[in-house]
């Protein structure tokens, strides 16, 4: 096998040069070359989305006391449950047990029964929803570049409306090409690039917020309890917005849907993943707290949903443009991080059901200049291309889908991030029922369930309001 190959299918029978055993791991699969650094990049790419720029809005709803406290609390919860899940990658022993390559496999090994199907439904519905949502969000960032230039040229009073659909098509074309990357093992370079982009635009947003807060040009209202009833919002709006803000913060940390797939790339698996989770969660928490607090200090109770695409800033326009380009590039990589587990699930299931179908199983070696050998699979080409097209079409039909994504997040956060990791840890460690440790783990699980239900209620209310104001043929830009 040529060492400069970029894309190589996991296939133990296709090695034509050299000793194939040197390229295989102890389980007969392609040798894992990932490290805790690449795993950290995957986590940061998955976690630090453009939602970091909306945390100022979330803090504005909760205030100086509750807002930062909720951010810190969910960082600890996410790190704790991710370490529990990392220990379940192998069963029954976390170090020497049998590997499980997907979240469903892990749940099957420890819990079994209908919980396996429930896990699959929650995980893959969430992955589908995220990829549709990222298509919309990336197009909004691309449109923001065009609108920023328009505002700079014609003034801030001009509407400068632009259709998102052409940019969704551009995003989809890029994803069709990148989706031919066979698996997570070959995705490290894209994740590292996306992680750098996320740091870049988050830092730009943070810097602009600091400059705005330090300038003291206009009076900004902030308070210990956030937006004020009777001044900024009505009593019912305060309740619904609080629910939405808590849900936004809780879901902002979640990466359990792709944790097992990331862990499978980096030996020794549980040790590397725990270290990567620590680095990833600590880094994201630092950025979340800084962007949330400084953004609230800059904009106060009038903080926009996204201060780069929502035009909390207009100047310097070239810096706003660059930040929005970084958001789009980051979402290109993040789309792949969330799509690859879904791609792998469908392809492995079809290969199991139709092992003799050459269209599904045959790999065609192609010599790509400067890249080495690429193994083309026609089923992978057709299925992944069709998936990207469908997500793009759905994004164009339902441009308010991001409101619905909050509901999907609420439905998947509790089972995938909290319930299953805790239940599998209890089964693995054989924790006695009603013992102190068992009780506090159950309390944590129930508290997070209540938070998910509250966030779901807030998302439903937001979705209803979006449907009321939605006009099918009107340009959809950032609210």
Image (spheres, rainbow, N blue to C red):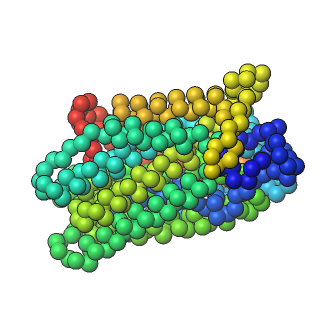
Q: Relative to 115, does residue 269 appear above or below in the rendering?
A: below
Query: Which residue is painted at 29% across and 34% down in the image?
Result: 467
Where's residue 65, x and y in %?
A: 38, 69
Q: Relative to 161, does residue 298 appear above or below in the rendering?
A: below
Q: In this view, does 300 lie to the left or right of 141?
A: left
Q: In this view, does 359 lie to the left or right of 417?
A: right
Query: Which residue is painted at 36% across and 67% down in the image?
Result: 204
Q: Can residue 424 be seen in this view?
A: yes
Q: Is residue 114 or residue 252 the one in the foreground?
A: 252
Q: Is residue 433 left or right of residue 26?
A: left
Where's residue 116, x and y in %?
A: 68, 36
Q: In this view, does 302 lie to the left or right of 421?
A: left
Query: Which residue is painted at 78% across and 47% down in the image?
Result: 1
Pick out the residue farthest to the front: 369
Q: Can residue 407 be seen in this view?
A: no
Where's residue 329, x and y in %?
A: 44, 53
Q: Relative to 150, does residue 215 appear above or below in the rendering?
A: below
Q: Is residue 140 or residue 460 the one in the foreground?
A: 140
Query: Which residue is painted at 47% across and 31% down in the image?
Result: 389
In which image quadrant can residue 394 be found? top left
């Amino acid at each position: 096998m040529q060492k400069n190959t970029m894309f190589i299918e996991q296939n133990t029978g296709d090695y034509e040069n050299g000793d194939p055993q040197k390229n295989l791991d102890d389980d007969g699969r392609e040798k894992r070359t990932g490290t805790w650094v690449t795993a950290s990049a995957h986590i940061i790419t998955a976690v630090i989305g453009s939602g970091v720029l909306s945390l100022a809005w979330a803090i504005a709803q909760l205030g100086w006391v509750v807002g930062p406290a909720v951010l810190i609390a969910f960082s600890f919860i996410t790190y704790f449950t991710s370490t529990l899940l990392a220990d379940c990658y192998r069963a029954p022993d976390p170090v020497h047990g049998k590997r499980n390559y997907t979240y469903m496999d892990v749940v099957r090994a420890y819990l079994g029964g209908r919980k396996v199907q429930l896990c699959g439904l929650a995980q893959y519905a969430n992955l589908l929803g995220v990829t549709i949502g990222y298509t919309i969000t990336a197009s909004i960032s691309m449109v923001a570049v065009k609108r920023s230039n328009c505002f700079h040229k014609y003034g801030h009073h001009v509407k400068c409306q632009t259709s998102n659909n052409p940019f969704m098509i551009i995003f989809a074309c890029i994803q069709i090409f990148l989706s031919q990357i066979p698996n997570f093992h070959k995705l490290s370079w894209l994740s590292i690039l996306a992680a750098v982009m996320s740091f870049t635009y988050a830092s730009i947003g943070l810097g602009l917020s600091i400059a705005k807060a330090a300038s003291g040009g206009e009076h900004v209202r902030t308070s210990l309890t956030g937006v004020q009833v009777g001044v900024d919002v009505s009593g019912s709006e305060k309740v619904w917005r609080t629910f939405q803000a808590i849900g936004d913060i809780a879901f902002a940390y979640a990466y359990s849907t792709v944790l097992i797939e990331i862990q499978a790339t980096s030996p020794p698996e549980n040790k590397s993943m725990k270290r990567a989770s620590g680095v990833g969660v600590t880094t994201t928490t630092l950025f979340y707290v800084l962007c949330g607090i400084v953004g609230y200090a800059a904009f106060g109770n009038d903080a926009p949903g996204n201060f780069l695409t929502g035009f909390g800033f207009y100047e310097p326009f070239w810096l706003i443009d660059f930040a929005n380009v970084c958001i789009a590039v980051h979402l290109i990589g993040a789309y792949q991080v969330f799509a690859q587990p879904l791609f792998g699930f469908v392809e492995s299931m079809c290969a199991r059901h139709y092992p003799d179908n050459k269209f599904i199983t045959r790999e065609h070696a192609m010599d790509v200049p400067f890249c080495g050998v690429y193994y083309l699979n026609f089923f992978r080409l057709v299925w992944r291309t069709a998936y990207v097209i469908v997500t793009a079409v759905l994004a164009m039909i339902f441009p308010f889908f991001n409101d619905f994504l909050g509901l999907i997040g609420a439905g998947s956060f509790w089972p995938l991030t909290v319930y299953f990791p805790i239940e599998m840890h209890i089964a693995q460690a054989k924790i006695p029922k009603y013992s102190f440790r068992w009780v506090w783990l159950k309390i944590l699980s129930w508290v997070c369930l209540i938070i998910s239900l509250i966030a779901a209620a807030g998302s439903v209310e937001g979705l209803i309001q979006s449907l009321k104001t939605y006009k099918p043929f009107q340009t959809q830009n950032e609210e």
